[in-house]
Amino acid sequence: MSSKSGGAKRNTEGEKVIADNRKANYLFSIDEIFEAGIMLLGSEVKSLRLNRVNIAESYASEEDGEIFLINSNIPEYKNATFGNHKPKRKRKLLLHLREINKLKNSSQKKGMTLVPLKLYFNKKGIAKISIGVGKGKKLHDKRQDEKRKDWDKQKARLLKDSN
C-alpha cells in the first residue's frame, strides 16, 4: 500500500503536518499549548488533504462561550460541485469546557493572544490544530532570541570541529 504525502511530512508521533505557523514563535512568546479539533466541511477536508491551507495570518477568538479560528485560508476544492465552502470563514474549534474557560481567561489578560501553531492530521486521520497562548514580543526580545540562536549554532559548530 503506497501513500502520497503531497509535500506534508509525518513527524515522530505519526502526525501528518499540513500547515506550520513558523512566524508564531518569532512574533510571540508561547506560554501554553492546547490541541483542538476543528469543525470542517467535506470540501475543506479535501483541500486540507491537498495541503492547501494557510494559517500564518489567523488567530483564535472566544465568542459566546466557544472558540473560533478566524482568518484561516482554506481554498475552495475545485472538484466540489454545489457544496463548496468560503475560504476564509470562521471555523469552530472543538475543546473541553475547562479548556475553553482557560483559553478565555488567558486571552482576556493584557497582551495575550490565541495563536494557531500548526494544523495536522493525527494518527486516526482527524484534523487537529495546536493553539498557543502567547504574548507579543517586543523588538528587543526578538533580537535577543536571534543572538541566542546564532550563539547556539556557533557553539554547535565549534563542538563539532573540536571532535
Image (cartoon, grey):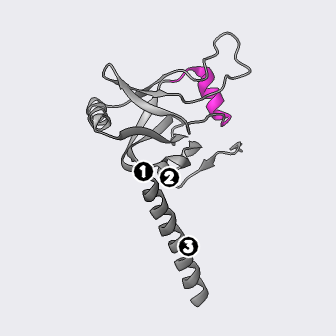
- Tag 1, which secondary structure? loop
Whether residue 163 is visible here, answered yes or no, is no
Q: Is residue 60 magenta?
A: no
In the rendered image, residue 22, in percent from the top left (x then y), is placed at 55, 49
| 47 with respect to 149 (left or right) | right
Question: Mark 3 and mark 1 in contact (Cβ < 8 Å)?
Answer: no
Q: Which residue is mark 2?
A: 26
Q: Which is closer to the viewer, label 2 or label 1?
A: 1
What amino acid is found at the position of numbered circle 1 in the picture? Answer: Lys
Q: Which residue is mark 3?
A: 153
- Tag 3, which secondary structure? helix
Seen in the picture, residue 130 relative to 157 is either above or below; the reply is above
Mark 1 vs 3, N-terminal side: 1
Q: Which residue is at the front of the view, 137 or 75?
A: 137
What span is in magenta?
Answer: 40-51
Seen in the picture, residue 63 relative to 151 is either above or below; the reply is above
Mark 2 vs 1, N-terminal side: 2
Q: Which residue is at the front of the view, 150 or 75?
A: 150
What amino acid is found at the position of numbered circle 3 in the picture? Answer: Lys
In the rendered image, residue 116, in percent from the top left (x then y), is placed at 47, 39
In the rendered image, residue 64, in percent from the top left (x then y), is placed at 32, 19
Q: Residue at x 51, y 74 (%)?
A: 151
Q: Which residue is mark 1?
A: 137
